Amino acid sequence: MTPIEAAGLYVGINILILLALAWQVISARRSEKVGFGDGGNEILLRRIRVHANAAEWVPGMLVGLVVLALLDAHLIVIHALGAALTVARVLHAVGLGSNTGVSFGRFAGTLLTLIIYAAGGIAIVWYAVT
């Protein structure tokens, strides 16, 4: 597997995760007959936030993975960051999706996402200047 193929793997997986989260919002909107906003429905609000949070954080690191691949980063770097991003976002989605308060999944997913962003940013700078 080449670096760009590895990056493509995680881009594809995370796009499918975003699609699944969007589908949860669509399903809740249809069942609750809410066309805009959350209609005061807690479940719909939570699903909207789960999807929105993923849509806020996932794309930046996916771009980072592609940049790393184009910079010919080691395959293990791309796999480590891509797999960790995928796990982090699933943890966060499950944690926030099941509980509006503090939960292990939400905390771990958030923390891991921040660590991945830091590691990814450092790796991009490293590969860009070396």
Image: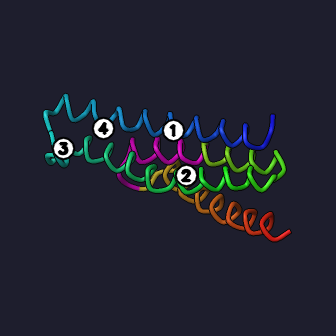
> Label for residue 3?
none
Q: Earlier in the sequence, mark 2 or mark 1?
A: 1
| Quarter the N terminus occupies | top right
Q: Nearer the viewer, mark 4 or mark 3?
A: 4
Q: Position of residue 130 (x, y in %)?
A: 86, 68
Report if the CB atoms under discs 3 and 2 are less than 8 Å apart: no
Name the dominant secondary structure of the magenta segment.
helix
Mark 1 highlights which residue?
A: 15
Q: Earlier in the sequence, mark 3 or mark 2?
A: 3
Disc 2 residue type (three-letter)? Gly
Give the magenta part as a residue range.
Answer: 87-101
Q: Nearer the viewer, mark 1 or mark 3?
A: 1
Q: Earlier in the sequence, mark 4 or mark 3?
A: 4
> Label for residue 41?
3
Disc 1 residue type (three-letter)? Ile
Q: Earlier in the sequence, mark 1 or mark 3?
A: 1
Q: Position of residue 38 (x, y in %)?
A: 19, 47
The residue shown at (60%, 43%) is 86
Instruction: Looking at the picture, tell me which residue is in the foreground, 40 or 23.
Output: 23
Mark 2 highlights which residue?
A: 109
Q: Nearer the viewer, mark 2 or mark 1?
A: 1
Report if the CB atoms under discs 4 and 3 are less than 8 Å apart: no
Disc 4 residue type (three-letter)? Val
Mark 4 highlights which residue?
A: 25
Dot 3 surroundings within 10 Å: few (below 14), some, or many (20 or more)?
Answer: few
Which quarter of the figure has residue 9? top right
